[in-house]
Image (cartoon, helix red, strand yellow):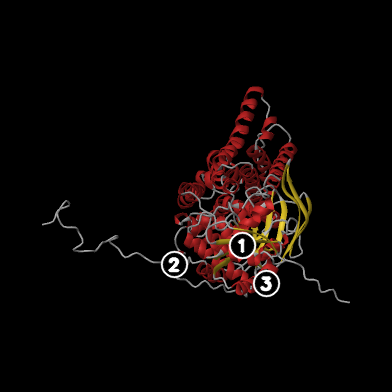
């Protein structure tokens, strides 16, 4: 027997093993470039690619923008929460007549149409601001932080197209929850109660007024949210800043109103300006003392300033020290 | 009367770029069209500034930039014909290479089928076909560089701008990327490639642009530029058993103005006219009947050239 310090010189069996596996010696691939003879599509196809990248990402991140699982789950919860009046409509249609208490509580009327979009609790206290904050948070700030806007700007995508498609993508996601749930509520009210054309003619102007309020809300929240996203490199900052704008202005105005009995500071609150306009459009009692024109001007100013910030910041994206 | 003047792919005229008090690029004029051109220069020379000006990410402080005759700062239409690989560009790490490149192909206006087919080809071209369904976040540095090149090629651009494409790559990846660049150049594409590694640029192309402190030092063929540097003598290194005897045969020849014996068995001939020196070289060697085992031009390379141009030693 031979041991490590044995007398043999070790040359009797001259073999060695380096690895237990056969090593791959490399790979050969066809490195031949083939020109492309096709024709590149027009501007709308490029813009649609941006849109689908952002919107389809809500459903799957395979080939699309990545949304955190918590964000997706929250969107589902908010969406289902926004649809809960439909379940109550269904119950009221099963158990009550057209003029009973359940129908007044859940059926289509001025107050319910206003509340479906602009009701403070739970929609504008919980649902819509949280939804906007989560969707809009990293929309531009992620590109600022990671430099991924270069992916767009080294292609035939203008900064205007980039901004518009980001805006449209966010608005469509918000609209899917806010507007769709509103339309579904109105449609369900007609279907569940078997209403006819006369009911449709009676309620359609109110529905359209509410729809306009919903679109205005989506537009305003999108522009404020994207403006905040464009000035930061953190999705967390954008989200928190948006919530602060919505809740902070509301809270300050509420405190001033309670203390001094003046609603004037509500013109600083995006939600209250929208609610004020919505009350007027749907013909319900106004619960703000200040003139409606101030709320309209305020909403216009908020949107103008937000879009101004957004376009200015996007124009400086990826432009080093310009 | 027809004016048949071809517009160069890249045209810069007296272009300067300042970052406050710092000069990024200083009065650069150049025209590049077709083939592979290496952009060389030490750190801070202005290579990345040059590229950013070309792709419209920076506005020139002075002068003009034209791609295919169009100002890329004002008009994005040249981007349809450009493939740009930025040094610092981030990728979508959660996507597979197939998804990422096809997504960007669609940003150029391709349909889904066109994008998928073209993506498969370009990923195969850069050697990533087998791993195209793996997430980019799991790729090595070299593979990520190749993904960048693939997405820059997916729309079949006429001008390809590669900012440090070999940076951080292992030797196999470098060889692969260099093959890709050479192949593109041989197909008539205009390829601009920057690198710090001079030997690798030499292996890719002899057409170079040299920048230093934002200034354009030289533009053209490597050997032609070297030939223009008359104040620096050209050296020819001969290996022979009898260097002194061979030196005496050379010393009377007109283009030769000096000889040195740097090492045992080595003879260095100094000349200001390299081509004329090479023309007399065979005759002198034959007439002297001295065996010469090797002839070399030690300073006819990029490193020496860069050293001469920027004022350093080689």
Q: Which of the two discs, 1 and 2, sits closer to the camera? A: 2
Residue at image point 39% right, 66% down: A25
Compute the Cα span from label 3 to label 1: 56 Å
Q: Are marks 1 and 2 on the same chain?
A: yes
Q: Quadrant of residue A43?
A: bottom right
Identify the chain of the residue marked 1, using the numbered disc in the image. B
Identify the chain of the residue marked 2, using the numbered disc in the image. B
Q: Are marks 3 and 2 on the same chain?
A: yes
Q: Nearer the viewer, residue A140 or B310?
A: B310
Compute the Cα span from label 3 to label 2: 52 Å
Mark linked to residue B130: 2
User: Is A135 situated left or right of A280 in this image?
Assistant: left
Disc 2 packing (10 Å; few <14; some 14–19; many ≥20): few
From the viewer's perspective, is residue A144 above or below residue B259? above
Q: Secondary structure at mark 1?
A: helix
Q: Secondary structure at mark 3?
A: helix
Asked whether disc 3 touches disc 1, contact meaning CB atoms under 8 Å apart, the reply is no
């Amino acid at each position: 027997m031979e041991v490590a310090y044995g007398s043999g010189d070790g040359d009797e069996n001259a073999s060695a093993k380096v690895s237990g596996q056969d090593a791959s010696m490399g790979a050969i691939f066809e490195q031949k470039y083939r020109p492309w003879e096709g024709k590149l599509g027009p501007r709308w196809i490029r813009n649609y690619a941006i849109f689908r990248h952002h919107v389809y990402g809500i459903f799957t991140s395979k080939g699309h923008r990545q949304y955190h699982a918590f964000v997706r789950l929250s969107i589902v919860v908010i969406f289902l929460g926004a649809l809960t009046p439909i379940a109550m409509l269904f119950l009221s249609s099963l158990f009550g007549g057209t003029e009973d208490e359940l129908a007044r509580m859940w059926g289509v009327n001025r107050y319910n149409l206003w509340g479906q979009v602009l009701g403070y609790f739970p929609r504008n206290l919980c649902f819509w601001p949280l939804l906007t904050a989560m969707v809009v948070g990293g929309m531009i700030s992620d590109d600022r932080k990671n430099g991924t806007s270069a992916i767009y700007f080294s292609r035939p995508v203008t900064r205007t197209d980039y901004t518009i498609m980001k805006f449209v993508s966010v608005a469509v996601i918000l609209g899917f929850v806010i507007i769709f749930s509103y339309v579904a509520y109105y449609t369900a009210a007609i279907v569940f109660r078997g209403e006819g054309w006369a009911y449709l003619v009676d309620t359609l102007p109110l529905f359209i007024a509410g729809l306009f309020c919903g679109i205005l809300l989506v537009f305003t929240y999108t522009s404020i949210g994207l403006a905040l996203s464009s000035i930061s490199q953190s999705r967390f900052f954008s989200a928190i800043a948006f919530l602060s704008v919505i809740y902070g202005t509301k809270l300050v105005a509420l405190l001033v109103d309670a203390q001094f009995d003046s609603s004037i500071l509500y013109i600083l609150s995006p939600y209250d300006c929208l609610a004020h306009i919505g009350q007027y459009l749907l013909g319900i009692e106004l619960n703000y003392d200040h003139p409606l024109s101030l709320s309209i001007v305020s909403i216009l100013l908020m949107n103008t300033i937000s879009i101004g910030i957004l376009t200015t910041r996007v124009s400086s994206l990826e432009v080093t020290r310009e | 009367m027809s004016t048949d003047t071809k517009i160069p792919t890249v045209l810069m005229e007296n272009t300067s770029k300042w970052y406050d008090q710092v000069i990024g690029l200083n009065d650069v004029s150049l025209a590049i069209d077709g083939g592979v051109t290496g952009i060389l220069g030490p750190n801070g020379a202005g290579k990345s500034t040059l590229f950013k000006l070309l792709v419209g990410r920076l506005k020139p402080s002075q002068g003009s930039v034209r791609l295919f005759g169009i100002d890329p700062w004002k008009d994005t239409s040249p981007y349809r014909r450009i493939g740009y690989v930025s040094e610092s560009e981030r990728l979508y790490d959660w996507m597979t290479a197939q998804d990422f490149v096809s997504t960007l192909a669609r940003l150029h206006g391709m349909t889904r089928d066109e994008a998928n087919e073209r993506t498969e080809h370009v990923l195969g071209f850069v050697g990533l076909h087998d791993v195209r369904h793996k997430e980019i976040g799991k790729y090595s540095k070299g593979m990520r560089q190749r993904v960048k090149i693939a997405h820059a090629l997916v729309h079949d651009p006429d001008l390809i701008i590669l900012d440090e494409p070999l940076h951080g790559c292992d030797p196999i990846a470098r060889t692969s990327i260099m093959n890709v660049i050479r192949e593109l150049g041989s197909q008539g594409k205009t390829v601009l490639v920057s690198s710090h590694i001079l030997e690798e640029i030499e292996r890719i192309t002899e057409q170079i642009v040299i920048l230093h402190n934002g200034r354009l030092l030289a533009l053209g063929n490597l050997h032609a530029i070297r030939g223009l540097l008359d104040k620096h003598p050209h050296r020819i290194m001969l290996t022979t058993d009898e260097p002194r005897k061979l030196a005496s045969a050379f010393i009377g020849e007109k283009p030769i103005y000096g000889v040195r014996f740097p090492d045992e068995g080595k003879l260095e001939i100094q000349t200001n006219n390299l081509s004329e020196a090479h023309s007399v070289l065979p005759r002198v060697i034959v007439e002297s009947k001295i065996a010469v085992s090797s002839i070399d031009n030690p300073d006819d390379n990029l490193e020496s050239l860069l050293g001469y141009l920027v004022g350093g030693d080689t």
